[in-house]
Amino acid sequence: MGIQAETVQLGHGSGGQMMKRIIDEVFLEAFGSPELLAGNDAGVAELSPSATIGTSPSTREPATHDDTTAQARLAMSTDSFVVTPQFFPGGDIGRLAICGTVNDVATSGARPLYLSCGFILEEGYPLADLRRICQSMAVTAREADVRIITGDTKVVERGKADGVYINTAGVGIVPAGVNLSGSNCLPGDLVLVSGTLGDHGIAVMSQREGLTFSTPIESDAAPLNHLIADVLAAAPHTRCFRDPTRGGLASTLNEFAQASSVLIAVDEEAIPVKPAVRGACGMLGYDVLQVANEGKMVAVVPAEEAEAALAAMRASRYGENAAIIGEIAALPDGSSQPASTTGSVRVRTPWGSTRILDMLVGEQLPRIC
Amino acid sequence: MTQGTAKDVAANAAPPLDAFRDPALARSLIDTIHALAGGHAINLMEVCGTHTVSIGRYGFRSVMPDGLRLLSGPGCPVCVTANQDIDHAIALARVPGAIIATFGDMMRVPGSTSSLAAEKAAGRDVRMVYSPLDALSLAHDNPGSEVIFMGVGFETTTPTIAAAILEAQAQSLRNFSVFCAHKTTPPALRAIAGDPHTHIDGFILPGHVSTITGIEPYRFLVDEFRIPGVITGFEPVDVLEGIAVLVNMVERDEPAIQNAYRRGVDTKGNAVARALVNQVFEPCDAIWRGLGPIPQSGLRIRDDFAAFDATRRFEVEVEQTVEPQGCRCGDVLRGRIAPTQCPLFGRKCAPEDPVGPCMVSSEGSCAAYYRYRA
């Protein structure tokens, strides 16, 4: 291993390959519970825990919930927010802090119910800004129909943090019979996105770096639990949801492909992207498919339910630009494991060529959420 | 942060570009290239790293006719920066009170034993900037620190560095300097055109660089080597049209330098920008990774501006240069081998943990081949 590996670097928080490695090699190595090893955005566990808790790591088994979905289960997720600047076009750190956790809980098919929030504040931070952030959190929580029921406050010396960091955690209930996971994708399933990609990453980046556009690019930060509920009602056999935050669509699709041991192909032309975002990405050299979103959902749905899922997305408040962008295919010659961890997601261009869509490497835009 | 006009982007710049992404037009150009090439062996080199990325991103290698090879040239500024220059920048980062400002790609390039990113993680102050003018703002905001901008790049970036130095002089900024590893494109093309181990039938010339240089500096390719060149843009139709024009010239044996990027490139280039560069910089010999020393291919800061030259301002001890074992970035940059022919490619050397610079920079040919494997 090279010189990059000795200390924590910004790329370890990028949502791409470096982050995957620090999670696999440090966190899962230490904590690997079956719920964590399932690798989804929210951990899902039984409401009345059996003897599995406290099982030593050497005897732990991968999560198999098939026999437990007859009962409602608990979903839990947590997320920390360090975005700078704290206020940006289309949102602020408070709105992000609610949406991020609500969306992560909701991807499990759970109805998010309660949140906690912890603040780490830097000495000297303006109280007026803190009030503004909390107002925004309150409004967003009402919109998402969740309640903040506990919290924590810490203050550190000036210079030891950057204004305000927020952690939120959320719990929700997965109804009986619902079992969503990135490992559920099957050949023939279709891939949907709920709207235009790249808006959040480019909005924060533009605000931070003083880029100005004639058409302002706004963050898409939004709670998507209602959208997910609508899609699940219309397409009850939906395999999984994931919000393509850091690392963008590229990370989400690669995670699905690996978890399900399948190939995924998407059509570049079908992927919705705003012209201004496309232009900004071109200018800055970013692949829009690796840029973060905070108000978008990727769904994998059986082909026969895809139109219903699409209609439900489009009818929902944050899904008017939803589209079907690709499909799941089987690995060649019936092998059950991808030969490598890369190369299982491909993009088809409109002129008949294809390219691999890899996970982001290194850092692209640090501290965007 | 500066809110300069240089950073303004017209939103309505996007729709007219759609014509250059037209799938039907792209498909017909691919057919044209197939018809023109007729299965002959043709080696084309794209000089510019942005073209390398475009070709990878659009998946063009997978749709080219048999025998037509697209080779990547020395046009990624990070990739051609010599190891000793990286080591020098790392040594500057260790100067107490120094803030190193540089473009993002430069951060992760391994020097002999460290990288700027590793120095940053170890507590040195290394900042990523998007423009040298941002480094000026840093110097303004940190009067107690020495802000050293690490400048890499070709004709497109040097005018902005020259402007930053002139601005620093106008503002009497005393804590701003530049470590200059800038290079000029034509001498590198000459080195490749004259390399007996490399056979190039035509050059896809850099669109951005040519906005500054114009067409004249490439004439020697035709006059001395009978190699055609085409200046083109970066959208799918631009690149394909450039390839078609080149293949046509190769097949007819009618070498010329053509400008297929008229919406961006004036044949005469940008004289104002060139004058700015000449005011601040003078040509010097430079070492290129892979190509070695090339006479008069680099730029150094003129004596009049010596106060802004980091190499003259800070006496630092630069470690002994160690070239990475087995790395063949040099052969890749000359077009002698494709990235996939390097024994380290994808094994010991991947974007996540790169050995050579061509795997680090997003514009590096190895990174582009790795990222966009067909």
Image (tube, grey):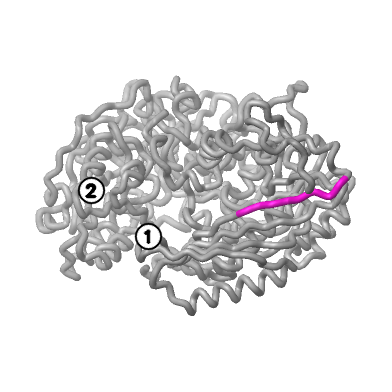
Q: Mark 2 points at which residue?
A: B180
Q: Which amino acid does label 1 sit on?
A: Lys
The foreground one among A194 and B158 is A194
SS under mark 1: loop
Q: Is residue B208 magenta?
A: no
Q: Mark 1 points at which residue?
A: A160
Q: Quadrant of residue B114?
A: top left
Q: In which quarter of the image is residue A126?
A: bottom left
Instruction: Identify the residue at horizontal 28%, vertical 44% (top origin).
Output: B184
- Locate the C terminus of chain A by quadrant: bottom right
Instruction: Identify the residue at horizontal 20%, vertical 56% (top origin).
Output: B177
Q: What are the residue bounds of the magenta stretch? A: A71-78
Real-space CA distance between mark 1 and mark 2, rounded to the nearest whole angstrom:
34 Å
Residue farthest toward the bottom in the current orientation of the protein: A128
Mark 1 and mark 2 on one chain: no
The foreground one among A8 and A60 is A60
